[in-house]
């Protein structure tokens, strides 16, 4: 083998190795970004209508709650305790230490005061009040969540979902990226 052939082979090997290293770097950065910063989530179902529709694609911000507490009306993502790889997306209604109750007329009370909000799609039906018929006092790291489609949402009103603890929260829905015609930052 001539010196020129050796150099050519050496250059090809270096190109292959550098390409592999570059790809490993990109995969590692992507993994870290998805694990700690943001991830794409697809809405499955109608529990957040009219705010979110079935098949909306969202970017979930996973970093904000490392620096500040979740706020009332934030839309959050958390795992469903009874089905692996199933995640719920709901709106925070009650904050730690608050007492939540829903009366027969569908009014939501926080610490005895009616909650002024405009996210509910409709008045909560009497048969959809669930466990919130009686006062629910949240612990120091617990949140009460509800879907915006109040009469078609499995949320904190049911024993299956119940109160959500802070460590269950994966992140807050930040932006809708699909469909493009509905692209927008999700605000409170």
Image (cartoon, rainbow, N blue to C red):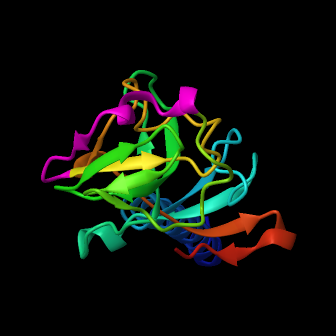
Q: Nearer the viewer, residue 186 or 120?
A: 120
- What are the residue bounds of the magenta stretch? 126-141
Q: Is residue 46 magenta?
A: no
Residue 38 x %, y %: 47, 65
Q: Is residue 133 magenta?
A: yes
Residue, x 24% and y 76% (percent of image)? Answer: 67
Residue, x 68% and y 67% (percent of image)? Answer: 176
Q: Is residue 45 above or below residue 159?
A: below
Q: Nearer the viewer, residue 114 or 30?
A: 114
Residue 118 x %, y %: 59, 66
**Count of number-bearing discs:** 0
Q: Is residue 60 left or right of residue 176?
A: left
The answer to which image quadrant residue 66 occupies is bottom left
Q: Is residue 26 left or right of residue 165?
A: right
The answer to which image quadrant residue 109 occupies is bottom left
Quadrant where the image shows the N terminus: bottom right
Residue 170 x %, y %: 38, 53
- Residue furthest left as drawn: 140
Q: Is residue 130 above or below residue 6?
A: above
Q: Is residue 110 left or right of residue 107?
A: left
- Residue furthest front as drawn: 105
Q: Is residue 169 left or right of residue 115?
A: left
Residue 125 x %, y %: 61, 35
């Amino acid at each position: 083998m001539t010196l020129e052939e050796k150099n050519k082979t050496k250059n090809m090997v270096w190109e292959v190795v550098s390409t592999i290293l570059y790809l490993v770097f990109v995969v590692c950065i992507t993994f870290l970004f998805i694990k700690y910063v943001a991830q794409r989530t697809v809405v499955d179902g109608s529990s957040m209508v009219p705010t979110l529709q079935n098949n909306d694609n969202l970017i979930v911000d996973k970093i904000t709650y490392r620096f500040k507490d979740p706020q009332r009306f934030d839309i959050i993502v958390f795992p469903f305790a009874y089905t692996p790889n199933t995640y719920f997306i709901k709106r925070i209604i009650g904050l730690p230490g608050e007492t939540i109750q829903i009366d027969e007329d569908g009014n939501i009370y926080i610490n005895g005061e009616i909650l002024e909000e405009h996210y509910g799609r409709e008045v909560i039906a009497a048969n959809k009040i669930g466990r919130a018929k009686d006062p629910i006092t949240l612990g120091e790291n617990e949140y009460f969540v509800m879907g915006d489609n109040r009469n078609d949402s499995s949320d904190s009103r049911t024993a299956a979902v119940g109160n959500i603890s802070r460590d269950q929260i994966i992140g807050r829905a930040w932006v809708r990226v699909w469909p493009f015609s509905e692209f927008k930052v999700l605000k409170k």
